[in-house]
């Protein structure tokens, strides 16, 4: 299992807690702060998905005029988790 607590930048959520199994399948995602209902939905949708599939689908999503979003920050967290091996 791999785990990260990622401090977000540029979003209403402040932290993303992610656990991924040894096959790069997301087991758990929890957002601290942000739009609770939407982030629960994102968490449930990505749980059970492969890390690379989630990155391919959510990378680059913006929130209004912001340069990033909670889904985009999730991708940053997943990329950092992947880089740790």
Image: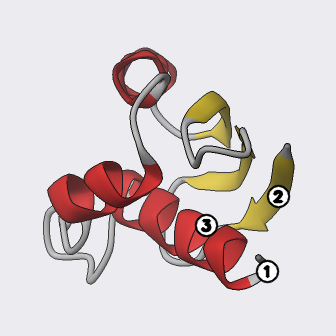
32 vs 44, nearest the viewer: 44
**Residue 51 at x, y = what percent?**
45, 52
Mark 2 nearby-residue class (10 Å; few <14, some 14–19, many ≥20): some
Q: Out of 64 and 6, give the one closest to the viewer.
A: 6
Query: How many numbered discs?
Result: 3
| Mark 2 and mark 3: Cα distance apart in space | 7 Å
Label 1 or label 2, whichever comes before in sequence order:
2
Q: Quadrant of the C terminus?
A: bottom right
Q: How busy is the neighbourhood of tag 1: few (under 14 within 10 Å), some, or many (20 plus)?
A: few
Q: Describe residue 9's horizontal placement relative to residue 14 as left or right.
A: left
Indicate which disc residue 4 carries.
2
The quarter of the displayed image where residue 63 is located: bottom left
Quarter holding the N terminus is: top right
Question: Is residue 38 found left or right of 30 in the rendered image?
Answer: left
Tell me what residue is drawn at x 35 percent, y 65 percent.
72
User: Dot 1 corresponds to which residue?
Assistant: 84
Q: Name the residue rendered at 68%, 84% in the picture.
A: 83
């Amino acid at each position: 299992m791999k785990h990260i607590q990622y401090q977000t930048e540029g979003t209403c959520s402040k932290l993303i807690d992610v656990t991924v199994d040894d096959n790069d399948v997301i087991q758990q995602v929890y957002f601290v702060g942000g739009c609770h209902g939407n982030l629960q939905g994102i968490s449930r949708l990505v749980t059970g998905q492969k890390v690379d599939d989630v990155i391919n689908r959510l990378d680059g999503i913006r929130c209004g005029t912001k340069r990033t979003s909670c889904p985009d920050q999730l991708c940053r967290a997943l990329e950092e988790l992947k880089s740790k091996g």
